[in-house]
Amino acid sequence: MFLGLDLGTSGLKGVIINEEGVVVAQANYALTVSAPHPTWSEQAPEDWWFAVEQVCEQLSQRVKLENVKAIGLSGQMHGATVLDQQGQVLRPCILWNDGRSKIQCDAVMAAHPELLDLSGNLAMPGFTLPKILWLKEHEPEVFDAIDKVLLPKDYLVYRLTGIFSSDCSDAAGTLWLNPETRQWDEQLLAMTGLKQANMPNVHEGQQVIGCLNAEVAKQLGLNEIPVVAGAGDNAAGAVGMGVTEPGQGFVSLGTSGVYFAVSEAHNAKPENTVHAFCHALPNRWHQMGVTLSAANSLSWFANLVSKSVPELLEELEHSAISKTSVIFLPYLNGERTPINDPLASGQFFGLVNSTQREEMTLAVLEGIAFSILDCQNALASAGTTVSELSLIGGGARSALWRQILANVLEKELTYRDGGDVGPGLGAARLALLGYREQEGEAIEALIKKYCQLPDVLATHIPVDNTFDYYRAKYTVYRNLYQQTKTLNIELTKLSMNP
């Protein structure tokens, strides 16, 4: 058996697969996010480690953990976890959806225009490089004490093995990696006053980087088994869904929303706010469009009206409502693709006295679908087309939402088995690949054997008589942001005043 640990924003998931790559057990432990100031988003790394302990305890009730042969990890990207020379965490991790470093992004882009060519990506507040510049300016005592900068899942790798390691897919999201060479770039590191010594070693996702520390293995009920480098959550999700070849892609409806497309080379188009990163497997790259608040928007609304997400969806499904004049902008954490605006805010527009809760739920689903359409359009403008589009993520469990998304994208969508555990499954697959590779099997043959597309659970064909409605509403959706974006600046100033 092989264990995948997926460190998400809202929780840590453990997935165990057997020798054939089939899921045999899984477990979850919820995490919370701290927002001490407007646009801030942080988590305590110690909470991640506690979650690992709890997930392993849950899994031990379902399978014999001593039969696990290797571990892989996936995780939320971009987070800045900073350690001192003793390996102690210096402050809470600044997460991917934190927007505080917009000024630092603008400054580094102005001072170092070569950043675009070297990294292939725009400096955005979600990425790790500008977060460290923010620390340098606002928490200099923390910056001066930094010995290592780790991404969230790489902190867990360190706790498991005592080794500082990262992988190409996750490291590409820091802005310090050159995606063509798939290694750290000295020039990019120098822009933040860092050196190679401050960074973990970079590996391909399936490469074994070491073994479990003996004490940790005993604590978790595992043997001293190999640990592979792992992957950022999106690349791991792609491995889990068998999306490994050019022309394949997926949409992820997790806390954030992602439109992911595999490419045969590093095709950078930063001017279109398209992310161009390394894939988790050798000789592969990918492009992404990202919306920062996908399923999170629906969870936020459910909490606001004191309902669960399933209750809201059931309520909408049982109503006769399929259209609404209400529009929702899902910018609860700012937005990346295509506007790159950390100050963008969530909005309901078009509310009247007769507006029903079901209409607002529908508007949230549509608004997130429109944000995914923004990503699709951005990828198309960069010359990227996807012939085969799968769906993963917790939000993809809703058949209603899947159909809305197919109608908005005007593209056939395939919902496959295992989509709700994509990144965790991908991490477990990477562990399997790495274990087999160490036994002498060729990696490309292993990828072909184990990274197959999962079984189809449902196929959603776009309904063409909905196109006029969604096209017209999408135009209003885009205009609404343009008409109100300057007001977000004024609102931010108000929220910062005592």
Image (cartoon, helix red, strand yellow):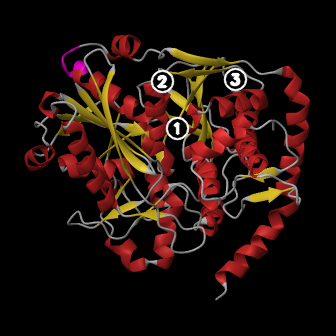
Q: Nearer the viewer, residue 150 or 421?
A: 421
Residue 192 located left or right of residue 266:
left
Residue 448 position within the rendered picture, expressed as x and y whole percent measured from the top left:
40, 11
Q: Nearer the viewer, residue 167 or 393?
A: 393
Mark 3 → mark 2, Cα distance in angstroms: 18 Å
Mark linked to residue 417:
none
Span colored in magenta: 436-440
Residue 437 belongs to magenta span: yes
Q: Which residue is mark 1?
A: 394
Residue 236 shows in this picture = no
Residue 46 position within the rendered picture, expressed as x and y whole percent measured from the top left:
29, 61
Q: Nearer the viewer, residue 155 or 107?
A: 155
Q: Which residue is mark 2?
A: 241
Give the image quarter of residue 320. top right
SS majority, magenta = helix
Rate crowding at label 1 as few (under 14), some (14 to 19) or many (20 or more) other CA atoms within 10 Å. Answer: some
> Which secondary structure, mark 1?
helix
Q: Nearer the viewer, residue 413 or 92?
A: 413
Q: Amino acid at mark 2?
A: Met
**142 to 224, vertically: above or below:** below
- Which quarter of the rendering shows the N terminus? top left
Q: Which residue is mark 3?
A: 385
Q: Amino acid at mark 3?
A: Thr
Q: Amino acid at mark 1?
A: Gly
Chain-order first, disc 3 or disc 2: 2
